[in-house]
Image (cartoon, rainbow, N blue to C red):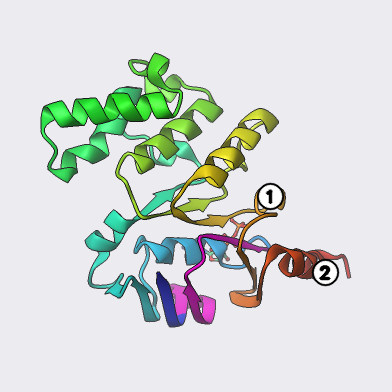
């Protein structure tokens, strides 16, 4: 589904991704690596939140540079910090927000909101102010709001970093049960132990690209103290 063609990305003059050429077709793909190695930048390139400084990113043949809107319909993005993503005063309004741009009638939007809240165990919180939710509840809302839009693929940027153990397990299960293609950036090795493919980043390059049984030891080697 994703094709990176010789992608470079920089902020100002500083290159943080170098010569990334990769095709991602597996259903569950993880991205791991040291802090600052370019994982989040790579994730944001996947749905056109950022476009490459040079090279191309194609999603089902759509170039993220020229077809950003169509790409973002296909590829949902869950941020590490749900506060970045929650935009409306109440839980129900937040889920409804994205749907407003999907051309649904008011009635269909309301029905979809009820359905999504129930699917994510949020029905009882529907009228609660979203900013007063706990961190775990906010994360659930952020995921629900993205899935409400029925993307084909979901990118998660460090989805468990801010969560306690219970919510971390819950989020891991939710991701495991998604039928979508998922790309997950994470430092949490438990989360990705049964993924299909793991990309290991170091200093803006993919230095290992393999199933977890090979990629995780390579990452641990990379992280070993000198
Ligand atoms: N918007 C930005 N403007 C300037 N520099 C940025 C920006 N976003 C990221 N960077 C820089 O790009 C480099 C790669 O950052 P990125 O967030 O992609 O790495 P990461 O592997 O996801 O790191 P972490 O594991 O700490 O989240 C870092 O040096 C970072 O400071």
Q: Residue at x 60, y 33 (%)?
A: 170
Residue 120 x %, y %: 44, 29
Kindly identify which residue carries mark 2: 221
Q: Quadrant of the N terminus?
A: bottom left
Q: What element does badge 1 sit on?
A: loop
Q: Which residue is mark 1?
A: 188
Q: How many marks?
A: 2
Quadrant placement of the C terminus: bottom right
Q: CA distance from mark 2 to mark 1?
A: 16 Å
Q: Which stretch did the figure color magenta?
A: 8-33
Q: Is residue 174 above or below residue 129?
A: below
- The quadrant in which residue 220 appears is bottom right
Would residue 149 be seen by someone viewing this image from the given angle?
yes
Residue 101 as seen in the image, left or right of residue 28: left
Name the chief secondary structure element in magenta. Answer: strand
Q: Is residue 88 visible?
A: no
- Between discs 2 and 1, the one toward the N terminus: 1
Do the residues bearing badges 2 and 1 touch, measured as CB atoms within 8 Å?
no
Image point (41%, 29%), residue name: 119
């Amino acid at each position: 589904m994703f094709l990176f063609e010789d992608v470079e990305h920089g902020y100002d003059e500083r290159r943080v991704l170098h010569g990334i050429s990769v095709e991602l077709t597996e259903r569950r793909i993880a991205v791991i690596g040291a802090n600052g190695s370019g994982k989040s930048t790579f994730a944001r390139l996947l749905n056109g939140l950022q476009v490459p400084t040079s090279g191309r990113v194609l999603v089902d043949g759509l170039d993220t540079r020229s077809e950003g809107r169509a790409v973002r319909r296909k590829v949902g993005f869950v941020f590490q910090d749900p506060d970045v993503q929650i935009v409306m005063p109440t839980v129900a309004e937040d889920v409804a927000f994205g749907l407003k741009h999907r051309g649904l009638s008011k009635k269909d939007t309301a029905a979809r909101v009820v359905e999504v809240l129930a699917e994510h165990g949020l029905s009882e919180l529907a009228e609660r102010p979203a900013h007063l939710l706990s961190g775990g509840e906010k994360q659930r809302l952020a995921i629900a709001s993205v899935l409400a839009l029925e993307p084909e693929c979901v990118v998660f940027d460090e989805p468990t970093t801010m969560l306690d153990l219970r919510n971390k397990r819950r989020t891991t299960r939710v991701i495991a049960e998604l039928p979508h293609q998922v790309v997950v950036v994470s430092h949490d090795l438990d989360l990705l132990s049964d993924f299909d493919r793991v990309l290991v980043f170091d200093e803006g390059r993919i230095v290992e690209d393999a199933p977890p049984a090979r990629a995780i030891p390579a990452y641990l080697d990379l992280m070993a103290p000198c």
